[in-house]
Amino acid sequence: MKQSLLALSITALFLSACDDKQQDNAQPESTEQAQVQAASTKTTPAQSQNSGKPQNSFLTAYDNIDLEQYKARVKFMSTDDFQGRSPATEGGRKTVEFLASEFKKLGLEPGNGDSYLQQVPLTSIEADANMELQLGDNTLKFPEDFVANSSKLEDTVTLDKSELVFVGFGIVAPEYNWNDYEGLDMEGKTAVILVNDPGFHTQDPAVFEGKAMTYYGRWTYKYEEAARQGAAGAIIIHDTAPASYGWNVVSNSWSGPQYHLAEPGDDPKLDVEMWITFDQAQNLFSQAGLNLSELQEAALKPDFKPMPIDATASVTVRNSISKSESPNVIATIPGKTKPDEHVVYMAHWDHLGMNPHLEGDQVFNGAIDNATGTAGIISIAQAFMALPEKPERSVTFIAVTAEEQGLLGSKYYAANPTVPMNKIVGAFNIDSMNVSGRVTDLTVVGFGKSQMENYVEKAAQRQGRELVPEASPERGGYYRSDHFSLAKLGVPAIYAGGGTEYREDQDMALIEKHNAKRGECYHQACDEYQEDWAWEAALDDVKVFFEAGYLLSNSGDYPNWNEGTEFKAIRDQSMQK
């Protein structure tokens, strides 16, 4: 860290919501602990004026969402003492205790039977960083030139002179008449794959979804498809523009423990999953007498044929494997008349933990990503509890684990729901909130997908804001956060926040500074709490989400996906059960 922070002893302060061994009368041992405790128990003016009387109206609850309470929670969760909030670590345990304690103190009921916790069984696989990749005639260094992992539960996994095949974007999509593996036997071979999908490169809305990334463009899909094709390995060629992030994000995210669900099912797995830098890819193709630029162009057409590369890949991945559990934290406010119908708020509490191989600051504090969103759902829960009556429908809050490892916490919840999927009326996901400056619009990631936008649109109007599509749909943001785990099972889910049209009274120089810093610090150790952030901007969004959920929780409507979206048929079928 660039500044010293007091060591925190969170165990002495917070209740463990699911373990009676924890004491509930401990006192804070630091200034920051006292600030958080004060923030959590602070009485609003409306509450003190209405002591012993029916509580405040919706507008009073809306107006009294407290900025200082929100900031205190963000600051607390992003201190070094939480060690970057990696799942199944001491920092992760402290985070879970804090969240369960906050929900309990606010008066929410446990959301998983009599517990606030849903244990997610995980397998941690950490590859020894002392490895090299022999790619053709070149020896690549980890993590400067490549990263590699294996999700197989084996101590040592080896690719030994595996034949390389360029498979374009590595996509099999019958609805687009697209098959990059057609006629190819990939048994024992390694696929070399371009990042994103053809629509990004052509910018043609008739090709896939044009600029907007589809799930076929996600790196997760590419590994899944290569495994289905029988490949032994897969190498994704990193390219900053279509990936939407630099190589440093790849190297940081793929170093250290990689978590997987302990019971992943019977889906095939690659022996080794890899990324290489664009420069190393060019070297590989050049040495094989191929032109990467020409092959990229050829891969944009549906009649593309996979191209063998006259080279092989060899690498040995040595794994340290351990089993663990890391909880989703679930709390609920039972509905007054329709308790079996639920409106869901989601945010992931985890981040990247620590990297002991770094010089200097080794903690990935994750202040924006996603202490801001996690604190946001606590503030929304607090606002609901300040209402004079419970909403008609239940409102459930899920702080999920292991998002950074591939949405694992939300995937587990979707496979093991505490509420049937057809009883989840709709879901709001909050991930990395706007702290750059107040805006007159509200960005919806995956704009136009569902009727959930109607509720957010109405709530945004109170602040004079209008809904707009995301500026960079090519990043595939809709497929990169936890709502996607519910969406795949048909639940209408919206992911929104921030905007691009800043209010006239804002200092544009400060906004530009915050935006630049946010980009630089994404998945970096410098994602740390800053007092001079535009905190009112984040609170604006918290209030929008609160009102949208309030409207939905008191409505008799069941929002659906819009016609033509990939999840509507799934929802329609589930509602017939």
Image: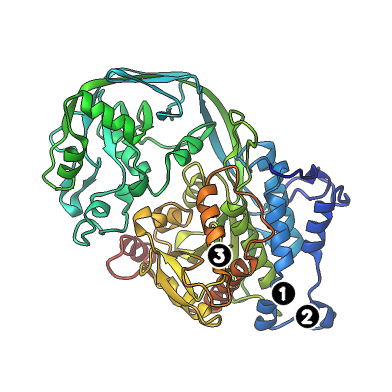
**Residue under circle 1?**
386
Q: Earlier in the sequence, mark 2 or mark 3?
A: 2
Q: Quadrant of the C terminus?
A: bottom left
Pair 2/1: label in front? 2
Within the image, what quadrant is residue 385 found in? bottom right
Q: Earlier in the sequence, mark 2 or mark 1?
A: 2
Query: Is the residue under label 1 in contact with that under label 2 (CB below 8 Å)?
Result: yes
Work out whether residue 428 can be spotted: yes
Spatial CA span between label 2 and label 1: 9 Å
Q: Position of residue 343 (x, y in %)?
A: 54, 67
Spatial CA span between label 3 and label 1: 38 Å
User: On screen, 47 above or below 107?
Assistant: below
* Structural crowding at the residue carrying mark 2, measured as other residues with C-alpha within 10 Å and reported as few (<14), some (14–19) or many (≥20): some
**Along the horizontal axis of the image, is 160 left or right of 206?**
right
* Structural crowding at the residue carrying mark 1, measured as other residues with C-alpha within 10 Å and reported as few (<14), some (14–19) or many (≥20): many
Instruction: Determine the residue positioned at 17% across, 44% down.
Output: 297
**Along the horizontal axis of the image, is 320 left or right of 491?**
right
